[in-house]
Image: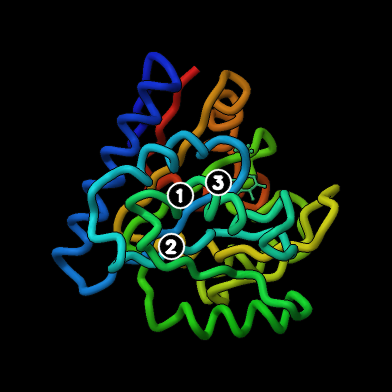
Amino acid sequence: MDFIEYSDADMMMLSLARILSRDLREALLRRDRALFAVPGGTTPGPVFDMLSAVDIDWDRVDVVPGDERWLPEDHPRSNAGQLRARLLRGKASAAHLLPLWRDLPPAEGAALTAADLEPLLPIDVALVGMGADMHTASMFPGAPELALALANDAPVIVPITAPDAPEPRVTMSARVLKGAFALHVLIVGAEKREALERAQKLSPTEAPINALLSKASVHWAP
Ligand SMILES: O=C1O[C@H](COP(=O)(O)O)[C@@H](O)[C@H](O)[C@H]1O
């Protein structure tokens, strides 16, 4: 794991937006289209704001949420809805969003989405977040489907039940996220740093973020 500590969150968001732009440009030199997997939640909004103003061949970029709450895009908790509002605007409005949600039960919808996603793999650039409970994407400790999401032969997308969450979810599996050419973890605050340190001493079943750390650059600011 590469751990990068920043003096403040604004500096981190700016620097991370530059790093992600560089990774996307490099991907577009290697491939006709770049696949960019991104998190939901409250943390990444400022990075999305900055990225949306960057000059990249966005019309050659496919943006996909790494996980999704099983809700239509106009719901305030939809990760895809947040991506449309914060990332796919300005220059980045030319990017193509691949939503995970379909108006179907999660298992059926996830199978259709996975079939669309599979030919585009591997992910070129993945950004993920982490909760203070050490979940990443929607791989939550204690979720009944977690073992499947962590398996070496896991499906691309796994329907998952997040303990205490108000709606069902789907998540990219650890194998798909770990297969990304560039993998970045974004975390803010003392509580999450302490959780990251704890996670490194635990198994991925106890601390799902630990399934990704060996391949990741972790960006942290207080
Ligand atoms: O529920 C989720 O939580 C994590 C962390 O979110 P944050 O609000 O603590 O930044 C996020 O990475 C994931 O994509 C999201 O669905």
Distance Cα–Cα, label 1 vs label 2: 9 Å
Q: Which residue is mark 3?
A: 209
Q: Earlier in the sequence, mark 1 or mark 3?
A: 1
Pick the residue in front: 197 or 33. 33
Mark 2 crowd level (few <14, some 14–19, many ≥20, 10 Å Cα): many
In this view, which residue lies farthest toward the left? 29
- The type of residue carrying mark 3 is Ile
- Mark toward the viewer: 1 or 2: 1
Distance Cα–Cα, label 1 vs label 3: 24 Å
Looking at the picture, how far across and down is residue 74, in whole percent?
A: 70, 59
Q: Which residue is mark 1?
A: 87
Q: Earlier in the sequence, mark 1 or mark 2?
A: 2
Looking at the picture, how far across and down is residue 194, in whole percent?
A: 58, 24
Q: Which residue is mark 2?
A: 63
- The type of residue carrying mark 2 is Val
Q: Vertical placement of 36 versus 189: above or below?
A: below
